[in-house]
Image (spheres, coloured by chain):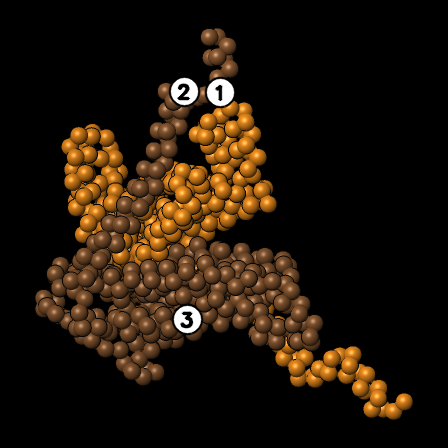
Amino acid sequence: MVVSTIGSLKKKSSSPRIILGSVMTGLSGLCMIVTLIPLIAVLFFVLVQGFSRINIDLFTQLPPPPGLDEGGLANAIIGTLVVVGIAVILAVPIGVLAAVYLSEFSHGNKFATSIRFATNVLSGVPSIIAGIFAFGLLVSSGIVGFSAIAGGVSLAVLMLPTIIRTTDEALKIVPQEIRWAALGVGAYNYQTVVQIVLPAALPGIVTGVTLAIARAAGETAPLIFTALFSNFWPNVSAQGLAEPIATLSVLVYNFAILPFKPQQELAWAGSLILVFLVLSTSILARLATRRKLY
Amino acid sequence: MTQSDSSNTDNLMTGGRSPLEKTLDNGFKWLTFAFALSIGLILISVAIIIAVGAFPAIKQFNFGFFTNSNWNPVTDEYGVIAVVYGTIVSSLIALIIAIPLGVGAAVFLSEDFIPDQIRTVLVFLVELLAAIPSVVYGLWGIFVLIPITTVFGTWLHGNFGWFPLFSSEPAGPGMLPAGIVLSIMVLPIIIAISRDSLASLPPDLRQASLGLGATRWETIFRVLIPAAISGIMGGVMLALGRAMGETMAATMIIGNSNRLSISILDPANTIASLIANQFAEASGLQISALMYAGLVLMLLTLIVNILAEYIVNQVKAKYE
């Protein structure tokens, strides 16, 4: 009798230690569920409230004047494309080439360490600070005024860290043997990088750029006082880039705080478009990175 | 031995590289170097441009900026104590909610309670939480969250009104709903970094603890969390930096009131939401004062982020 109790390795399921463990497992699972509730709630409301407003007019019409119904947010969709386009044109070459330097030519020197550090610091800079930067650089200095260009510059500052980091990582995964092989058959450094290494890292780079674009499209704070807003069609000329322009994210902000139902509905519809954009790119990026080349 | 022979050998030695191609090769290297350098320059010029813009206000108010709670564009009198208070308190509310939830979820995701595939999906869903634009959280906050927190706040005020934090009737927008939305937005950071630091612990720690007869949760509480605590702290610091700088969700939900109030049910304001709210219509000294406030925000987030970076790197160095 005595021997069997001492020798037993069985843990009694009623012992306080075991019960505490099960309770804690349940609690941590509960934390997980509570964390996901807002995600589901946000997606649910955006889908339900926004979907009723999805129609052809939404993509072809201007927003209605206060008090009137109908209309769409076509100018804001175009505006978002224009502003994000400017940001991409500025940020992608700078970001990719800076990452090429960090990963291919720096050999991990002190300078590269400090640039990586600067990239991290830049990614922690609040988005509204990027807006003030673009305002101070372009608007208050009188170079362009409130415009799509100023908005694009502020978004470019926010996109840079993501692009540099993902490109840097994508380049690091490319096996060293490929570089040696290219240099071994007599290729120059730039040939190795441009024709061999960059194409090999392309899927990773494209993924990073896509994610950065999706994030930038949702950014609002830096655009409020750089790109401002406009209720009209954007001017289709180079001059148009130097004028205030509507964007989806600022439209959501402006219309959410108006007391008119049609405007609020448009804000939900705009949110649905933004959320769809972000979700689809995130999922695509996830699928793309799952298939590893090497 | 003729002249042409020796030049052929020369060609072989240098791989037949023409001066043009050599220049191109070096030029490419320098080009990438210049772009890398430009990242540092952008960061520095962000600081300089904001400091230059803030200069008139710095000259006018100096450190009085930090003791004055008035923000009055009519009399051109500006002080940030109310918005600095709002920034810190709303971020603290966010952290108080997000730390237990985030660490709990991180432990759940780093242990093998559920199959790997489901865990991958959950990790992805947490990433999505971070991907939703803040303006969408703001919209959702206005129409869905605020009605809920108003009911909850009325109950809090009714039953615990004697407590200073709940001493006012909820007015809809306010510190509490803003703090809740901020907590949602920083949760993914805390979860991702805590999970990473828990997962990167050497397995010996766990094996040793289990070998001494500890249960799973005793191991988690007494061995794993203490070992990963600096990583978790780094994640919390990053989350703090994010919460302090978050603009849209705050400005749409917090009520944009510059009155300093101890009650978290009252409307308040943060530095970022003050700037978002007033910058487009500001002029003259007000712009400069807003840039001064922006400079304060940038310094606050910079300090927090650099500390976080430092802590996270220390942890990486320890276990790599």
Amino acid type at image mark 2: Lys
Circle 3 residue = A88
At horizontal 29% and vertical 62% (from top left) the residue drawn is: A276
Question: Relative to B162, is A120 above or below?
Answer: below
Report the amino acid beneath label 3: Val
Q: Nearer the viewer, residue A117 or A53?
A: A53
Q: Measure the alpha-carbon separation of dots 2 and 3.
A: 62 Å
Report helix, strand or loop for mark 3: helix
Judging by the rendered image, the residue that carries numbered circle 2 is A12
Residue drawn where x is 67% and y is 67% of the image: A180
Q: Which residue is mark 1?
A: A9
Q: Colour of chain A?
A: brown
Mark positioned earlier in the residue sequence (1 or 3)? 1
Q: Are marks 2 and 3 on the same chain?
A: yes
Count of number-bearing discs: 3
Q: Residues within 10 Å of mark 2 (few under 14, many from 20)?
A: few
Inter-mark Cα distance, 1 to 3: 64 Å
Chain identifier for the orange-coloured part of the image: B
Name the one closer to the observer, A173 or A18: A18
Any part of residue B173 in sight: no
Contact flag, marks 2 and 1 (Cβ < 8 Å):
no
